[in-house]
Amino acid sequence: MDSPVVLGIESSCDETGAGLVRRGRLLGHAVASSMDEHARYGGVVPEIAARAHVHAIRPVIQRALEEAGLRMADIGAVAVSTGPGLSGALQVGLAGAKGLAYALDVPLFGVHHLAGHVAADTLAHGPLPNPCMVLIVSGGHTSLLLVRDLARDPITHLGDTLDDAAGECFDKVARAFGLPYPGGPAIDRAARLGDPRAVPFPRPLPSSYDFSFSGLKTAAARWAEGHAGRALPVADGAASLQEAVADVLTSKAVAACVEHDVDTLVVVGGVAANSRVRSLAEARCRTAGITLRMPPLGLCTDNGAMIAAVGDLLIRAGTKPAPLDLSIDPSAPLEYAALHPVATAPAGAA
Ligand code: KG4
Ligand code: ZN
């Protein structure tokens, strides 16, 4: 059977994304962000995010279709991120996805947002090897995962964050440094002129695959407080924080690859856009003989193409679609890529 064009919809946080994927190929995608509306509050305000999705969802889908040179009637399946995320924000995307699936009479798939981040890389670099090691570093999650067949197999968590996620650490420390929201890109920019060895920030949990960034966040905030009344050397603080985060993330990811004899590391999520995380991962993987894969910057942060990519993989694995009473799951654990009961054909049958 010919693979359908899959529309992916993403609305779990402050980005409204729509993407179109067919047989692993990205046909077009568009993203609208309500980031500027949250900036003066220093973080995402859930109600503002939900309202912004309501306004953005139709034009974003239209822009994705235009970029792909397709019409609404060409959509053969709809995939939507149903969790984890902000509940009001997720509801908007799910309502839009259900409406379209019903109106077009096409199947609907509920997708785990983080599986979307993993699948994003396939749009740039082709199918993932089985197995591969995946480091997810986003605003809300930091996980080290052993991924086999993303569409069929359960995902093994080797490590997760015990407290703050890496992106959260960047965002909160940026605030303490007087940098704008979102903090990750601001720290990345400020760090360019700084000395990464200027401040000896801690490297938490060195002998575990779990992560903890809350102590590092506090150390950085204390360091900033210690300059009260004096000029804060922001560039040095930013470079040193970024070095500590990149060091912890990449050393654990490479150690996990070596221990589990996995030769491919995939680094995904918003923090994979960080220049030092990227360069240190490249250097350490090269030394260890590990193939490193990272999505291009535009596919690292939240987007609809990554959700469409999961939908496309699920369809090609013979996954049963979701019922139209599918609901959101704001704190969904990452076990399977699909977020609804599935029945798949055995591998090789599709
Ligand atoms: O994956 P994502 O777009 O949304 C979530 O699912 O959370 O990740 C957003 C996170 C934010 O914490 C943001 O500060 C961080 O990714 N981020 C960065 C960079 N770009 C985005 N962190 C460090 N350096 C960057 N260049
Ligand atoms: Zn995300």
Image (cartoon, rainbow, N blue to C red):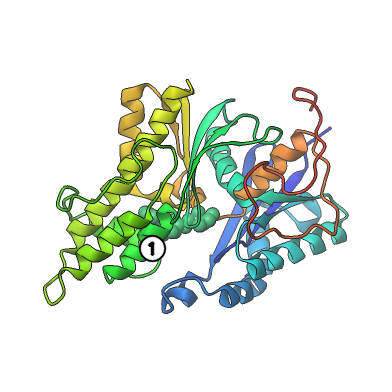
Residue 191, position in %: x, y?
Answer: 24, 55
Looking at the rendered structure, the secondary structure element under dot 1 is helix
For ligand 2, which image quadrant applies? bottom right
Image quarter (top left, top right, bottom left or bottom right) of the C terminus: top right
Q: Residue at x 73, y 47 (%)?
A: 6
Q: Residue at x 53, y 75 (%)?
A: 45
Residue 281, position in %: x, y?
Answer: 35, 36
User: Foreground: 117 or 141?
Assistant: 141
| Label 1 CB sits under 8 Å from any ligand 1 atom | yes
Residue 210, position in %: x, y?
Answer: 44, 42
In the image, is 272 to the left or to the right of 186? right
Q: Which residue is mark 1?
A: 171
User: Foreground: 22 or 290?
Assistant: 290
In the image, is 165 to the left or to the right of 179? right
In the image, is 187 to the left or to the right of 123? left
User: Image quarter for residue 287?
Assistant: top left
In the image, is 285 to the left or to the right of 99? left
Residue 244, position in %: x, y?
Answer: 28, 47
